[in-house]
Amino acid sequence: MVLTPARDVEVIRYLEQAITGGKHWYTALLEAIGLWTTAEETYNGRSYRYLIAGEAFDWLLLAERLCEAVSGLLPDDEKTALLLHNKPPLNLTTKKFKELIGSIKYHQYLNYFYGITVEEALILAVQEEVRKERRTLVYGNEHNIANEVYRRIYDTTKTALLKHFRQEKGYPQLRSTSLTEIKEFTYWLFKYRLNHCDKARVASDTTKALEQLRQRLTNNGSSRKLVTEELSA
């Protein structure tokens, strides 16, 4: 069990004082994220891992943790929009966001964005391709779709990749996976694809994933300015 160290308890106290002192809660939250030092902890019986594989920063998970700590000070509708839909109450520029959370955490955020968010979008895009093909062929066996998706992207099945991942990490070969393990596995898949697939194919697949993500944001009517700026970078 990893408990919250005293220095991060002070970060929460700073967040409380900043909000009650009149600073906008979202700005204060990002400043607190920038000051936070713990990579993982256990709080109220729940385990949090903010840094995946020591490289990819899950900033929204830390935002959730900090929002819970000062919940009574936040507007419920704005908090929900941020945590459930990634819609911040202020339209900050990427430069300002980076300034508030710090350059190191921002770089780690980019690792999470490209290594997990974009990788998930790639899997979804290929999944949609496979389903369309199988509807055309009147062959819609959902049981085999996942394996076909992973074969097309990674040249082997999901089962084989998950087994390889767990062996490499020293994790038990369980029937179920936690949300934290899914995120870590997705980031591992991103690294696997970079290391094992042809560079031209990697570039093509990444472009496909970014387009899938753009379409999803557009269809959802999202105002996620920060993500949109990353997509156009």
Image (spheres, rainbow, N blue to C red):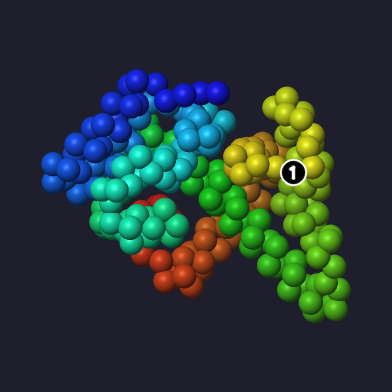
Task: Please determine whether, in this image, residue 7 is positioned above or below residue 33.
Answer: above
Q: Where is residue 73 in the image (x, y as percent from the top left)?
A: 26, 48
Q: Position of residue 40 (x, y in %)?
A: 49, 29
Q: In this view, does 161 lie to the left or right of 66?
A: right
Q: In this view, does 204 lie to the left or right of 32?
A: right
In the image, 20 versus 83, the foreground residue is 20
Q: Residue at x 75, y 52 (%)?
A: 150
Task: Please determine whether, in this image, residue 82 is positioned above or below residue 199.
Answer: below
The image quadrant of residue 134 is bottom right
Does residue 109 appear anywhere in the picture?
Answer: no
Q: Residue at x 69, y 27 (%)?
A: 169
Disc 1 packing (10 Å; few <14; some 14–19; many ≥20):
few
Q: Residue at x 77, y 47 (%)?
A: 158
* Outermost left residue: 21
Task: Please determine whether, in this image, residue 76 is positioned above or below residue 69.
Answer: below
Q: Position of residue 152 (x, y in %)?
A: 76, 55
Q: Where is residue 127 in the image (x, y as percent from the top left)?
A: 70, 63
The image quadrant of residue 136 is bottom right
* Circle 1: residue type: Ser
Quadrant the N terminus occupies: top right
Provide the residue designation for mark 1.
Answer: 176
